[in-house]
């Protein structure tokens, strides 16, 4: 018998734990600041509450209907051809968790170094050197990566109710408490009002096509879409739960955390006249300088990196569960065997990702470090393509089966199913194709691999197709 969530709140918190990751805590505030503040916030909210709501509900319904992992779900309803879409989702999870665990290791290392004072400096140049020296080390990042990977695997080992659900029930409230503490401290710094203004002011002059790309990409990543996570988590949902109302709660919790993160980070950055640039630099270079400039900075810095660790862990748990669940379903493995195999696999690839950050410059693909290559391929290619085909598959091939799941226990939603289907089957694919420019990206990828001149064989076929 397949495992199930112990309660509705357990499912919501576990799913919210998946969606509330590093992207929500450190990337969202700076994307908002860079792209027009409240203007970007409105666009992001709109995408999450429309496209995000439709796609997440669909993935959960697909999981509950089939009671299987992504590969098994697509294969059961669509046959071997469509099962490739589920396989892409599993592959995305494997690739992401490999480099995500490395970043999780960084949060662990900086939690320790902040409390001990090893990275406690107001000098930005020293802070940058500390970070570059750390990531280039062949030993320390790998050891912390191993610690984070084992913490993730240990949670998964206990299963759905005793592992994922129980840990999420504790970690999610802890994360929110940490955020509130840091918000209070950040907004009591002299000059913090400017950061609040950057975050919330509506500057539509900064809204460009890149703004929409950023908002859509961030919504995919922050809502755990196109990874098979919600299909897997949906397969553990009982028949008594209402999918769409639960999805609304998950998204609301995610959006709330994003806004709280903005209220935490940007006021402190501007109060200390530090650059607010998105990326790993702001987290591991600028933020140590922020806390070094504060009274009791080591304490608050420790709390900040503790919150990052919690956010990273709850997300990595969901990524690993997709892989483990797939091995259990498809190969009838025991959970402990599936966990060990998965751990060895993503830890090994993660080691190569870590080494590609500086210990060796030979681990490159298309002039990108292995770390950056996996990030680009998953975020800009595999995720939008996977979600595009999911939308088409559900809307035009198996819609009656999924509609049945969406309206179960919520009969009043029946009248909304026709616009829901049209949005899923027509609007979502158009949005993905236009904003992500899939054809353009595929052209760049094929040309980068094969060259731009006419060729024969596989490359010639691919160039002719696009």
Image (cartoon, rainbow, N blue to C red):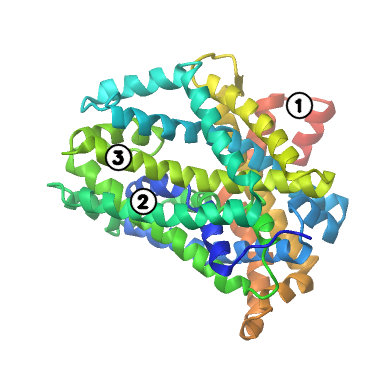
Q: Earlier in the sequence, mark 1 or mark 2?
A: 2
Residue 135 position, x and y percent, is 45, 22
Residue 12 position, x and y percent, is 54, 63
Residue contact at pointers 1 and 2, CB within 8 angstroms: no
Per the model, the C-alpha gap separating discs 1 and 2 is: 42 Å
Along the line of sight, the residue nearer the viewer: 54 or 327: 327
Q: Earlier in the sequence, mark 2 or mark 3?
A: 2
Q: Earlier in the sequence, mark 3 or mark 1?
A: 3
Tell me the residue that label 3 is attached to.
Answer: 276
Task: Give the answer, above or below, for where 136 lies relative to 100.
Answer: above
Of helix, strand and loop, which one carries label 1? Answer: loop
Tell me the residue that label 2 is attached to.
Answer: 32
Q: Residues within 10 Å of mark 2 (few under 14, many from 20)?
A: many
Task: Give the answer, above or below, for where 259 lies relative to 280.
Answer: below
Q: Residue at x 57, y 25 (%)?
A: 353
Q: Residue at x 27, y 49 (%)?
A: 182
Of helix, strand and loop, which one carries label 3? Answer: loop
Q: Is residue 437 visible?
A: no
As drawn, which residue projects farthest toward the left?
Answer: 190
Residue 304 position, x and y percent, is 33, 42
């Amino acid at each position: 018998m397949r495992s199930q969530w112990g309660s509705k709140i357990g499912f919501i918190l576990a799913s919210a734990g998946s969606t509330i990751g590093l992207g929500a805590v450190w990337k969202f505030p700076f994307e908002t600041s860079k792209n027009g503040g409240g203007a970007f916030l409105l666009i992001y909210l709109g995408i999450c509450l429309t496209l995000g709501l439709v796609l997440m509900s669909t993935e959960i319904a697909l999981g509950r209907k089939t009671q299987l992992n992504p590969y098994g779900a697509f294969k059961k309803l669509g046959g071997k051809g469509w099962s490739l879409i589920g396989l892409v989702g599993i592959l995305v999870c494997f690739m992401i968790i490999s480099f995500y665990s490395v970043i999780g290791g960084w949060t662990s290392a900086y939690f320790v170094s902040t409390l001990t004072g090893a990275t406690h400096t107001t000098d930005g140049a020293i802070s940058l050197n500390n970070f570059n020296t750390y990531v280039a080390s062949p030993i320390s990042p790998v050891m912390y990566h191993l610690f984070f990977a084992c913490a993730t695997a240990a949670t998964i080992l206990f299963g759905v109710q005793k592992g994922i659900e129980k840990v999420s029930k504790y970690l999610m409230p802890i994360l929110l408490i940490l955020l509130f503490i840091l918000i209070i401290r950040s907004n009591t710094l002299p000059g913090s009002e400017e950061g609040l203004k950057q975050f919330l002011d509506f500057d539509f002059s900064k809204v460009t096509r890149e703004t929409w790309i950023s908002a859509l990409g961030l919504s995919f990543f922050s809502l755990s879409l196109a990874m098979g996570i919600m299909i897997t988590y949906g397969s553990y949902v009982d028949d008594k739960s209402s999918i769409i109302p639960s999805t609304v709660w998950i998204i609301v919790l995610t959006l709330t955390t994003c806004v709280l993160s903005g209220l935490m980070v940007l006021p402190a950055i501007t109060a200390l006249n530090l650059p607010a640039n998105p990326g790993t630099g702001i987290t591991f270079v600028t933020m140590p300088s922020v806390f070094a400039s504060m009274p009791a900075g080591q304490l608050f810095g420790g709390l900040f990196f503790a919150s990052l660790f919690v956010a990273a862990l709850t997300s990595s748990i969901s990524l690993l569960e997709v892989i483990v669940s797939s091995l259990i379903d498809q190969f009838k493995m025991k959970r402990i065997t599936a966990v060990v195999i998965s751990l060895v696999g993503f830890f090994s690839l993660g080691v190569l990702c870590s080494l590609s950050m500086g210990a060796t410059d030979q681990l490159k693909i298309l002039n990108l470090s292995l770390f950056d290559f996996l990030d680009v391929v998953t975020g800009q290619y595999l995720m939008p393509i996977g979600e595009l085909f999911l939308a088409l598959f559900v809307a035009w091939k198996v819609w009656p089966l999924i509609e049945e799941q969406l309206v179960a226990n919520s009969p009043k939603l029946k009248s909304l199913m026709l616009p829901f289907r049209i949005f899923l089957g027509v609007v979502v694919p158009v949005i993905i194709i236009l904003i992500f420019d899939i054809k353009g990206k595929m052209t760049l990828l094929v040309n980068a691999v094969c060259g731009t001149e006419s060729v024969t064989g596989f490359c010639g076929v691919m160039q002719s197709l696009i």
